[in-house]
Amino acid sequence: MKKILVTGSNGLLGQKLTPLIKQKDEYRLIATGRGENRNPDKEGYDYVSLDITNEQEVNEVMNVQRPDFVINTAAMTNVDQCEEDREACWALNVKAVSYLEKACKTYNSFFLHLSTDFIFDGKNGPYDETASPNPVSYYGESKLAAEEVLLKSDIAWAMARTVLVYGITPNMSRSNIILWVKKSLEEKKQIQVVNDQWRTPTLAEDLAMGCYLIVQHKAQGIYNISGKDLLNPYQMAMQTAAYFDLDSSLIKETDGSKFTQKAKRPPKTGFILDKAIKDLGYAPVSFKEGIAVLDKQLKNM
């Protein structure tokens, strides 16, 4: 039985990968994260506490577990926080990746790393896997530096680049645009939503499946794993209002110049998914179908 070690298993993507992998008979899952296991589902896999910014811990865990595959979902993803706390951002988004890459080399593990559309400047999205990066934020710079660790490596590796991941978990600490719009409109609050940033929003379950497909195919190289609909937040908000039958007149269209944020955002990213569809059989849902998935999960909670 092949072993898959997942870092950052307490995060949104980690909590979607856990049930997906543990039900597959051909794999044994080792979930890792900082501190205790915060996944509500604790059966059918092993959990090990691991701080990937600590090279010694990385080596100790890898030496004991000897995984066939490592999926690195751990990252500092708050774009403004990365701008403010550059040291912590670099430690988790770059140094930790180099520790994992070295350990994968030592133990002959396949390394799947998660990357982002924020490595691009957003001037000519949507992008395919061959597009030239040019980040406009420190977060984007850190994620690009991590990509370069792998591009220079001679281990078996893959990168799953993704865009604006949304989803919910039972112990949810983070909101997302769907939940925010739904809650605001249910409370009859007027909201301002930007119309000048374009993304291909990604359902967390789709991203988890994309990662699993990469491992299953042992597919090397870069893969775009995102949603398929190119939308701006205003359109996402309008679709959310329509789905839940809420008053869309409370949604006011605005642009990014009305908001002050520490980090610059790329105006138009989004991904072309042809490679992942062809090589992996990747089949993401539409944004409307993604809203329906969240709705069903909310009702079951």
Image: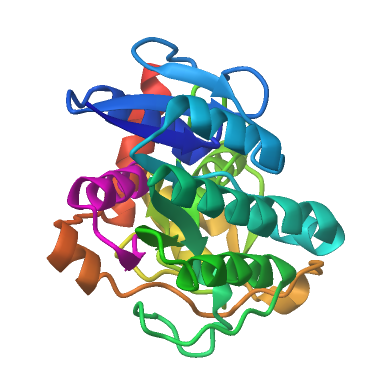
Pick the residue in front: 176 or 249: 176
Q: Where's the N terminus, which quadrant?
A: top left
Residue drawn at x 22%, y 71% is 275
Residue drawn at x 57%, y 18% is 37
Q: Residue 11's quadrant in the figure?
A: top right
Give the x, y percent position of residue 129. Answer: 35, 77
How many badges with numbers are in the image?
A: 0
Q: Residue 145's quadrant in the figure?
A: bottom right
Residue range (magenta): 205-226
Q: Residue 264's quadrant in the figure?
A: bottom right
Left or right: 100, with 284 as reference point: right
Left or right: 162, with 209 as reference point: right
Query: Is residue 39 in sight in this rendering?
Result: no
Pick the residue in front: 51 or 244: 51
In this rendering, the answer to whether 10 lies above or below 270 is above
Q: Where's the C terminus, which quadrant?
A: top left
Left or right: 8, with 129 as reference point: right
In this rendering, the answer to whether 144 lies above or below 110 is below
Give the x, y percent position of residue 20. Answer: 29, 30
Pick the residue in front: 120 or 36: 36
In this rendering, the answer to whether 147 lies above or below 2 is below
In this rendering, the answer to whether 152 lies above or below 294 is below
Judge whether residue 224 is colored magenta: yes
Give the x, y percent position of residue 266. Answer: 60, 78
Residue drawn at x 42%, y 72% is 270
